[in-house]
Image (cartoon, grey):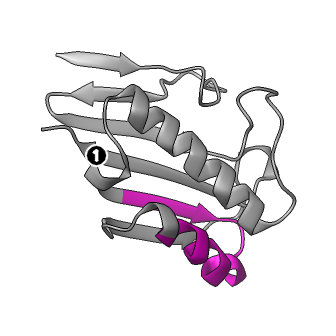
Amino acid sequence: MLKKVATDKAPAAIGPYSQGIIADKMLFASGQIPIDPATGEITGADITQQAVQVMKNVGAILEAAGTDYGSVVKTTCFLAEMADFAAFNAVYEKYFSEKPARSCVAVKQLPKDVLCEVEVIAYLG
């Protein structure tokens, strides 16, 4: 059985998708970009500020699913510029101290021209 995860503590979906889906004991969370859920606006002008907001949004979805960063088993990270890799990692490691499996790639463009996006898969068992 599938269960949708939704919270007003993370940005509403900007397309035809859910913030997250729980399937059995797994949470599959949609990619989060640095939108402030209170204002609907992009937060931060640099990678550090944007990464912090992304992590807060990811955390809100994890919380709505009844879990936290420690249960994340896989992340996929998208950067607008690979030159931001080190600065992004400096923020990332503060939230993902358990060091889940990860992919990190640079892409041509992200929604709303943001600098980063992160999606997660977490184990809820």
22 vs 44, left or right, is left
Amino acid type, callout 1: Ala
Magenta highlight: main SS = helix
Q: Secondary structure at mark 1?
A: strand
The vertical placement of 40 against 67, above or below, is: above
Q: Nearer the viewer, residue 85 or 64?
A: 64
The vertical placement of 93 against 83, above or below, is: above
Q: Tally the marks.
A: 1
Identify the magenta region: 75-93
The vertical placement of 39 against 100, above or below, is: above
- Counting from the top left corner in percent of width and height, residue 90 is at 59, 76
Q: Is 66 a magenta residue? A: no
Q: Which residue is mark 1?
A: 122
- Counting from the top left corner in percent of width and height, residue 9 is at 59, 27
The vertical placement of 95 against 27, above or below, is: below
- Counting from the top left corner in percent of width and height, residue 58 is at 51, 44
